[in-house]
Amino acid sequence: MPMAYRIDHERRTVFSRGWGLLSDAQVIGHYIELVAEPAFDCGFDQLCDISRITTLDVSPLTLRSLAADTAFADDARRAIVAPGDYEYGTCRMFQSYCNSDSVQVFRRRAEAANWLGLSADEPNGDQ
């Protein structure tokens, strides 16, 4: 699966990352796996970095569904790193479906980490 996560209890943050082809099935699978994880806490923040994907093929219907059925608490902050124009625009669509200031999209990881109160060199989900 081209998505992975790491739950950091000390920082109260879920670090997610994506690579390669990211489709509806992979995004939904990541979500299902994450919420089934016993260590998952809905109050944790999330840093989702998709800067290493090669193709983003996620439908607006999937984005809308995940925005409506989030496992994260309303006050949990979710930062998405999407440097490419298409990926950034798609993630902004997800942000608009969430209709919340607690979800923000960034082009640079350092900006996303800063918004979450993390250091810019914070390890990603693969560490």
Image: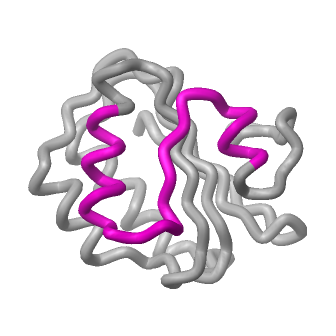
Q: Magenta part of the protein: which range?
A: 89-114
Q: Nearer the viewer, residue 92 or 19?
A: 92
Residue depicted at x 41% and y 39%: 1
Q: Based on the picture, tell me whether residue 73 belongs to the magenta stretch.
A: no
- Counting from the top left corner in percent of width and height, residue 42 is at 57, 81
- Counting from the top left corner in percent of width and height, residue 97 is at 25, 62
Report if residue 125 is visible in the image. no
Image-based side of 101 in relation to 57, left or right: right
Quadrant location, the C terminus:
top right
Q: Based on the picture, tell me whether residue 105 belongs to the magenta stretch.
A: yes
Residue 76's place in the image compared with 79, above or below, is below
- Counting from the top left corner in percent of width and height, residue 54 is at 37, 16
Image-based side of 108 in relation to 29, left or right: right
Residue depicted at x 13% and y 49%: 60
Q: Name the dominant secondary structure of the magenta segment.
A: helix
Task: Quadrant for residue 33, please give it.
Answer: bottom left
Report if residue 30 is visible in the image. yes
Q: How is the image coloured?
A: one colour
Number of numbered discs overlaid on the protein picture: 0
Residue depicted at x 74% and y 33%: 110
Residue 61's place in the image compared with 109, above or below, is below
- Counting from the top left corner in percent of width and height, residue 118 is at 83, 51
Residue depicted at x 28% and y 28%: 56
